[in-house]
Amino acid sequence: MVDRLVRLRSVCSPTNSFDSFRSTHLRIGDVISLYAPDSRGENNNICGHEGFLSTLGLVDERCVVVEGHGNLQSPPETFRDCLFRICPINRYSAQKQLWMEQKRLQYSNSNSSSDSFIDEEMLIRVEIAAEKEREQNRNDYTKMLGNIVQYGSSIQLLHVKSDKYLTMQKNSPARQERNAMRVYLDKLGNEGSWFFVEPAYKHVSLGDNVMSGERITLVSFTSNNSNISSVGPKLQLHLSNHRLTDHKNCWEVNCLNEQTEWQAHVFLQYDENMTENVKSGDVLRLFHADQQTFLTLDSEPKNIQNDRVFLRLTNRPSATDATSSRALWEIQVFNREMPLRGGALTWRKFVRFKHLATDQYLTVLPIDKEIKNNEELINKKANNTKNILSYNSTTFIQFRSIPSQPETENPTYILIPKRSEDPCRDEDILFMLDPCTKVQTKESRVPINSYVRFQHVKTCTWLHSTNPQLKSNLYYSSKNEKGWVKVICEPYKIDKEAFSLSPVVPNEVRDLDFANDACKALHQFVDLIKSGKQICKEIIKSTTQLLIDCIYFVTGIQQNNQIMIDPLKILNFEPLRDRQKLLREQGVLAQIFDLQKAPFLPRQGIGEVHPLLSAPAELNEPRNECFLKMFQLSYSLLLYSQCGYRKNQEFLAEKFDHIQEHIGFNLLAEETMTAVLHNNPKLLEKYVKIPHVERFVELVRNNRCGKFLFYLADLCVSRGKLIKKFKN
């Protein structure tokens, strides 16, 4: 074994290789990253053609390598997009039969076939068989957990963030490199998700154990299952030289019979990836035990450019119920020598806290008059300067670096957010955990739900809450917000200043990731419309599908690829309040309104560029059918997002003037508006104005359609009582 390690160390380049003497075997259950080194050669003149296998977020199923997006010494900022778990191959025979029966039943129902009863009985039997097969797959994973991966063995790669399998779609060409096969992320996986692990070099043979840091090739099982030991290029996971048309900094990943070497680096070992311990990549809520509040990062309502870290007071009877997507923090275990390594958190290790919604890190800032004056001056100048901000951009004040030696005897710091360019080398964002109970050794792992105190490493100060009774200790307070309490750091420890490390279920994290990615994708599409550039069919199709996915997301409909459900005709569903809240908090609903405004606004470009549409009536023309579909889907999404949720209803009610412009053009705007107001007298009194009612009266007179009369009744009558101001 030692001879092989020495040989491996001499073969690999010193800049790209992992230190083999600290390496480990790859095992089933390990979480890894895959890095494609730069394959410069005679036929490759592309500089910097390397990077981590990554994705474009939860709203896009394509796999890519992003140019300049991290390296082996400094992982990318969105390293969660690059993590995969090694799994044994699953069986799919019963699942495949289930898909065929679902298609057959759908076809027979659409044609009113007499065999539908027989098809339903067969479908029930196949569903039972498919469930047993899934249970057997779970049992096989448990049995094989920890087994060493060997060259020549077959595996599946589960993308951790999306919980989908890396899959090759046979007989489907890639979007850019047409002679290659398409690679994407699939929710359930299929036989295209099976890959052989083969060595990239001849000094390693089939049957040897695979070690972390070694270069491997991932050969598709579907096209090469006849003879895995055959000589010559095989269809394998391939980094293409073709860039994506809509993401110019991304190279396509597909399957082609050209060799691409991938370095597999362990992020979490299988025995570290346990739910009872805190580990790198975990998402937590930090609950202050004494104040009964969550540590939160949010923007001030009066000045969205200022992000604050605070303890949010609540009026709820149970403080633990006051959960928010703004209070989610990702744990990153600091590893100076191996930046790509995560691992389980121990009491001796340093840790970083990354805010999940904004990608900012916790750090501290000295409190003194000079910095306060500088902050006020910079803010004053920023307010007088016209800035074009993106939907989630933030203006950050560049403070001086934290002094290693305090200038005063007992310095005080304040907790703030920071966007770090290189988190692996940034000492300002490192913290240590101090246990509130006795532990055996400092090498003991930190249990989940344990109470800890936080110490900032560089300043040796401890996190303390402030007195919420003093107004000077509040960033913000209002009728809806009880108070945002400041958090400071002082050089002495107080026993009561303890936080609970409360775990967050993976599905809640994925919901937040989906909402964030959806907001980014919608924002990019709106910017494309405003830019005056040509909008291709592929982008329109992907945006339409995104709106459909958002509808399924908020209604909780489990969409099946084999049975299509009309997103405009979903009637029986249970509103998911947490997801409704996410769409508002993460800006998805705001982007929907921007999307509805963009086609009617002047566009940028050389000379005068007219809007895409001059009036809503043009949406009903055949040439604008794609935009008509978008508007109908967007209003359906607004309709579903407000069902039974008061805050979203108020958010939509503030946009009634905008919605009124689209009433009467078959865009589902009138259905959305009246659904918000149905039996809601407070909103009727506060937000509905005379012009809104007059518009519906005009529609009743001109169209003589019964549905507009019902809509008018919803505006004038609530719970059987007439609204007095609309009597005339």
Image (cartoon, rainbow, N blue to C red):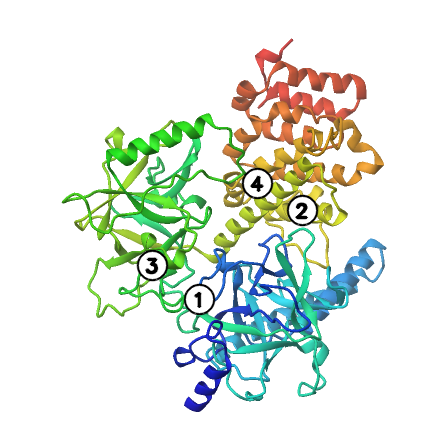
- Callout 3 amino acid: Val
Few, some or many C-alpha atoms within 10 Å of disc 4 (few <14, some 14-19, many ≥20)? many
Q: Which residue is mark 1?
A: 340
Q: Nearer the viewer, mark 3 or mark 2?
A: 3
**What x and y, as percent, mark residue 620?**
80, 32
Q: Earlier in the sequence, mark 3 or mark 2?
A: 3
Q: What is the quadrant of residue 649 in the picture?
A: top right
Callout 2: few (<14), some (14-19), or many (20+) C-alpha neighbours within 10 Å?
many
* Residue indicated by mark 3: 351
The tag earlier along the polypeptide, 1 or 2, is 1
Apparent side of residue 561 relative to residue 132 in the rendered image (left or right): right
Mark 2 lies on residue: 548
Mark 1 crowdedness (10 Å alpha carbons): few <14, some 14-19, many ≥20: many
| Of callouts 4 and 1, the N-terminal one | 1
Q: Nearer the viewer, residue 279 or 394?
A: 394
Quarter of the image containing the N terminus? Answer: bottom left
Vertical position of residue 310 compared to residue 348: above or below:
above
Is residue 405 placed above or below 385 in the rendered structure?
Answer: below
Indicate the amino acid at tag 1. Leu
